[in-house]
Image (tube, grey):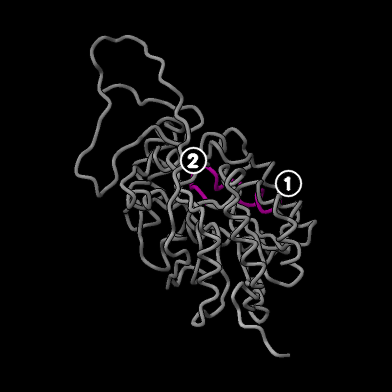
Amino acid sequence: MPAPIKHPGRGTTSNAAGRFERFTTDVTDDGWDLPEDLPPLRTEVRDEVARSLISYNKSPDLPFDRSINPYRGCEHGCVYCFARPSHAYLGLSPGLDFETRLIARPNAADILRRELSARSYKVATMALGTNTDPYQPVEKSRRITRHCLQVLSDFQHPAAIVTKGTMIERDLDILAPMARKGLVRVGISVTTLDPDLSRRMEPRAPSPRRRLAVIQHLSEAGIPVRIMTSPVVSGLTDHELESLLEAGRQAGADAASWIMLRLPREVSDLWKDWLQQHQAGRADKIMARLREMHGGKEYDPRWGHRMRGEGTYAEMIAHRFDAAVKRLGLATHTPALRCDLFRRPPQAGDQLTLF
């Protein structure tokens, strides 16, 4: 079996077929033992004409019941990303395909405007960034997230955004006025303060220092920001929990949250491969601790368990987090965003009123 082919700047070396595919392909040694220079693995973006945009959920683990995702796949390439298995529904691999073969939805803003305009629509906070990052690098040229954000602003619709991307700073002209009306909150995910570990684990995401600067810039613009210390990785990043919260507080965050590492479906094998390449000496301990929190399994999808795990170690992390946020004055529950300002703006073809 040949050694895994490493692609600089990518989170995984695997491109195993998704679970719905009948056939798989494998890299095999041709026996010639001749070095070959492989072409760089470039990002490919395809367009998808969206028929609908708002996704609804009834998960008791989530603080929102609806979300929008301008993109499928994410170039940040975070090896641990729980959204990777969603690429299998497209006939693509949750491995390298997830971070190199992206799907953009260029008509997303138009569909969003149509769905918000429906007479049956009932307003509640809209989440962005729940599956893939709305401010990943492709957003610089495509601007789909910005167009969707402008629609939400036009409707005075509340929005909660989660991102690692610095591109969100470009949209301060939309976000700041929304924040003054109580219509927006942002969560910035910071997994580690170690730039080397971050580069290997989240190869195309901004550095930890840069993400903390984003928190500062948003906070200075009057936008409430939560630092998300997620995922917490036992035996790898867990010792940084208090330092992450302190750094977020110093940067201007007013709230905090945490989630334990999750390894659904194909993510488990991708993560274990990554550990063997980058943290071989800690791999067994990290996986043993993870199984300990999930009843001997690598992942437990039950509501109420999948985000935090259970047992002594999970309880210890929860206690450490609670003590730190109390000491730092960080909130864990924030005021609800305003829904009473929602209105359907005038559109072409509307009947004019007499008064």
Q: Amino acid at mark 1?
A: Ala
| Residue 190 left/right relative to 291 | right
- Name the element at disc 1: helix
Q: Please name the residue shown 51% across and 38% down the image.
A: 201
Quarter holding the N terminus is top left
The extreme left residue here reads: 22
- Mark 2 closeness class: few <14, some 14–19, many ≥20 residues within 10 Å: many
> How far across and down, in percent of the image, does residue 204 sit?
55, 37
Q: Which residues are magenta?
A: 231-246
Which residue is under mark 1?
Answer: 213
Residue 28 against residue 349 in the figure, above or below: above
Confirm whether the magenta stretch covers residue 233. Answer: yes
Between 349 and 62, which is closer to the camera in this rendering? 349
In which image quadrant can residue 299 be found? bottom left
> How far across and down, in percent of the image, does residue 348 sit?
61, 72
Q: Please name the residue shown 47% across and 56% down the image.
A: 131
Residue 281 against residue 214 in the figure, above or below: above
The disc placed on residue 77 is 2
- Label located before the other in sequence (2 or 1): 2
Q: Please name the residue shown 26% across and 9% down the image.
A: 32
The disc placed on residue 301 is none
Marks 2 and 1, Cα distance to the nearest angstrom? 21 Å
* Residue 311 visible in the shown view: no
Quarter holding the C terminus is bottom right
In which image quadrant can residue 327 be found? bottom right
Confirm whether the magenta stretch covers residue 115. Answer: no
